Amino acid sequence: MEYENHSWIWDGVCYYPHVFGGIMITAALLGLSTSYFGGIGVHYLPYMCPGFGILKKRAHGKKRVRVYMDGCFDLMHYGHANALRQAKALGDELIVGVVSDEEILANKGPPVLSMEERLALVGGLKWVDEVIPNAPYEITEQFMKTLFKEYKIDYIIHGDDPCLLPDGTDAYALAKKAGRYKQIKRTEGVSSTDIVGRILTVRDISAHRDSDDPASHEESSGVNKIKQPTVGHLSHFLPTSRRIVQFSNGKGPGPNACVVYIDGAFDLFHAGHVEILRAARQLGDFLLVGIYTDQTVSEIRGPGYPLMNLHERGLSVLGCRYVDEIIMGAPWEVTKDMVKTFNICSVVHGTISEASPFVNGDSDPYRVPKSMGIFRMIESPKNITTSSVAQRIITNHEVYKKRNSKKVESEKKYYEQKTYVSGD
């Protein structure tokens, strides 16, 4: 290790005063000076006393800042991903607590996703370094001590939206009091409450369409007529180029990289998506993901779909640690031109996916890669689909309607009192 100057002496005086005090007193008593060493300058003292080398290393070795953020992460979306991205920017290592099913039930109502599914989603994000399962909803004195002592957490992070306990108190009050709390900006335009509302709307559309009541099929406007959106839902998300850049890796494949391509709707991003993307990434050096347009998804799935629009789905996929690049609005068919343009060496598709009437026959979207011998079916690690997740809410729609009504009022109050918060 090189020692360019004498700063290690002053560091030593600051950090080891008793050691240097002893040296100086001894030197004074013996009447020593630097000339006594016959030209041996301070540059060589560390080599004569190797232990002194730690003085400079300890003084200049920067401690890695560990930050903690928790959440339910139920029906995880790009808003959650962006919150964790912001949290990671406040430190070097991000540790994420995933609130237990029991705590969610007690404080917010029944969760849609299991703990296993929520852990897969959080662990699959590119900004997350470590995950703590079954975290408490409230930052208690005991848990805060555990974070500081066992996990070496420096700061606890949360968004600018209030997180209140059933009794109306702040869940992060103790962290704020301890001076170890930092705040990030909430991502506007999406929430788990909003997504549950979109799914319940699809249920209403489906019930209306399947009704035997002739009045429900009237084309003209009527008293009981329900407006049926043909493509997706009204989203309040305002996509910007900066947000896409923040989520992007910013790197392309190397000249000899094996580029793996997988496409789909990736609607209501779930644990099944994370696991199939992980499996696909392991087959090559670079994973390129094609995301269908809203129009394509609507044609395949029917009215009310997709639940999330193209930009929302794009950010959810781009936040996944296994994804290197995405194609926003990918074509339904994989063409020879696509294969050449992106230098694709393998096109893959999972065994579990939403039912589609076009997978076989003349309209097979994978006809070209199959003819080129680069198509491969891979086993889907999880038996989860967007429909199966949505069905959990539809099956218990009364419970989720009740839960949503409370949350909607809370979010309405937040937006009414909302002020500008700097950040990204």
Image (tube, rainbow, N blue to C red):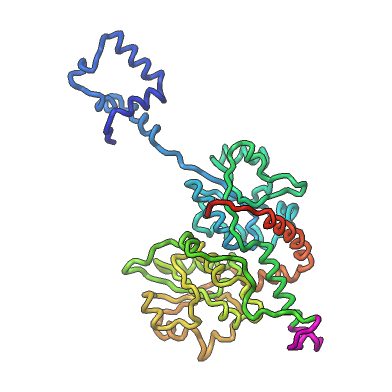
The image quadrant where one finds the N terminus is: top left
Nearer-the-camera pick, 144 or 348: 144
What residue is rendered at 73% in x and 44% in y?
A: 169
| In the image: residue 46, left or right of residue 129 | left
Q: Where is residue 141? Give x, y as percent.
A: 67, 38
- 66 w.r.t. 188: above or below: above
Q: Predominant secondary structure in magenta?
A: loop
| In the image: residue 343, left or right of residue 126 | left
The reply to whether residue 154 is in sight is yes
- 40 w.r.t. 169: above or below: above
What residue is rendered at 23% in x and 18% in y?
A: 34
Q: Where is residue 196? Give x, y as percent.
A: 69, 66
- 50 w.r.t. 32: above or below: below
| Residue segment shown in magenta | 209-223
Of all residues shown, which one is farthest toward the bottom? Answer: 362
- Find residue 205 and report its image quarter: bottom right
Nearer-the-camera pick, 257 or 171: 171
Q: Where is residue 19? Give x, y as percent.
A: 38, 19
What residue is rendered at 41% in x and 18% in y?
A: 18
